[in-house]
Amino acid sequence: MWKLTEGSRGVWEEAAAKEKGEYEERKSEWEAACEKITGKGKKKKEVRPPSKYMLFCASQRKEIMEGAGEGGEKLTFGDVAKELARRWAALGEDGKAAWGGAHELLQG
């Protein structure tokens, strides 16, 4: 490996710093041009409010998981999803409509 003295090393470090500055400048110009062409930027994605079903699942999931712990069995993700779907289907239209109020509040 080559060994550089402080004097000769400084020349290379200055050149690297200059190159890095030019690179950063060209990079920002390129990103601005791409944003202008595609219309895409680093915008935050608008998050939709949870649906009635998702609100129902969030409230029932803990109850299902606690019920599984009493029997000593461990439920898989699929088992929990099946039980949530079964309970949702058993609610009927009136029960599902009750969850619509919370959905409407979150929707704004």
Image (tube, helix red, strand yellow):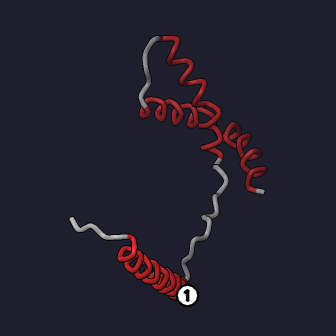
Q: Nearer the viewer, residue 38 or 30?
A: 30
Under mark 1, the amino acid is: Lys
> Is residue 3 rendered to the left or right of residue 78?
left
> Is residue 62 rendered to the left or right of residue 38?
right
Residue positioned 65% across, 41% down in the render: 55
Query: Is 22 rendered above or below residue 88?
Result: below
- The location of residue 32, given as percent across then percent down, is 54, 85
Reading the image, the residue beneath label 1 is 36
Tell me if I can see residue 38 in this picture: no
- The location of residue 104, given as percent across then percent down, is 76, 52
Tell me if I can see residue 7 in this picture: yes
Q: Nearer the viewer, residue 53 or 17?
A: 17
- The location of residue 42, given as percent across then percent down, is 57, 71
Residue positioned 48% across, 11% down in the render: 71
Query: Is 1 rendered above or below residue 107?
Result: below
Q: Nearer the viewer, residue 43 or 19?
A: 19
Residue positioned 55% across, 87% down in the render: 36
Residue positioned 60% across, 64% down in the render: 45
